[in-house]
Image (tube, rainbow, N blue to C red):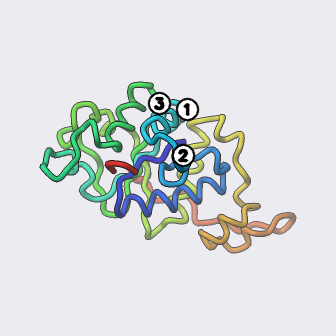
Amino acid sequence: MFINYRRGEGAYAAALLDELLSAHFGEERVFRAAKSIKAGADFATSILEAVGECHVMLVIVDPGWSSRFTPSDRRPSPSQDWVRREIEEAIRLDRTVVPVLLSGAERLRQDDLPEELTRLACAQYLRFDYRRARQDAMYIAEQLARVSPRIAGRRVPWLRCPEWARLLRVPGADRSGPGTTARPDWPPAADAHEGGR
């Protein structure tokens, strides 16, 4: 899977989601530019190759995300905006693209997006809200497993993953065997239906 994000609030959320999903599915299954591109590697080539190899792209959407596509002297041109280029490439390759709305982010509207990205407004979105990060992270993992059987085949049962226990503070999740029954609140709320970043 490929995590698409902008610097700022989106980058922090992307890093947390990366760590959680990596613990669940395996680090090699999650691409995030700041972590995954090796020192000295060509940035553009690495990005485009990763998009081509992914099955699912998660687009981290923070408040005001759509407005950053409005032309401005202080903003990169479309060809230099890697958030946009990554999404366009994923759409061109017919990958599954899932908007992940952060706290305070509104559902995407076609009128607010460049023509090449209007498909995002019709895509079923997920939420990653700091007020229910535990539930949302687990729900995202479940949805990814449904979308891509290849991803699901590599997942680690969450009850046996100490990393999930530490990050999400799930009581008992660092234990295995008989009597381990703790799990997070489930399901989440019903509306769950670097260069140039």
Residue 53, which numbered label? 1
Kind of element beneath mark 2: loop
Viewer-side label of 3, 1: 1
Residue 129, which numbered label? none
Q: Is residue 178 above or below residue 113?
A: below
Kind of element beneath mark 3: loop
User: For the residues marked 2 and 3, what is the alpha-carbon distance in whole angstroms?
Assistant: 15 Å
Kind of element beneath mark 1: helix
- Does the CB distance between marks 2 and 3 fall below 8 Å? no
- Does the CB distance between marks 1 and 2 fall below 8 Å? yes
Q: Which residue is drawn at the image coordinates 40% and 46% (left, top)? A: 59
Q: Which residue is drawn at the image coordinates 47% and 47% (left, top)? A: 3
Quick one: 171 or 100, which is closer to the camera? 100
Look at the image and tell me whether residue 96 can be seen: no
User: For the residues marked 1 and 2, what is the alpha-carbon distance in whole angstroms?
Assistant: 10 Å
Quick one: 168 or 85, which is closer to the camera? 85
Q: Which residue is drawn at the image coordinates 42% and 38% (left, top)? A: 44
Q: Residue 86 in the image: x percent, y percent?
A: 39, 38
* Residue highlighted by disc 3: 95
The answer to which quarter of the image holds residue 131 is bottom left
Q: Residues within 10 Å of mark 2 (few under 14, many from 20)?
A: many
Pointer 2 or 3: first along the chain: 2
Residue 31, which numbered label? 2
Farthest residue, direction front: 40
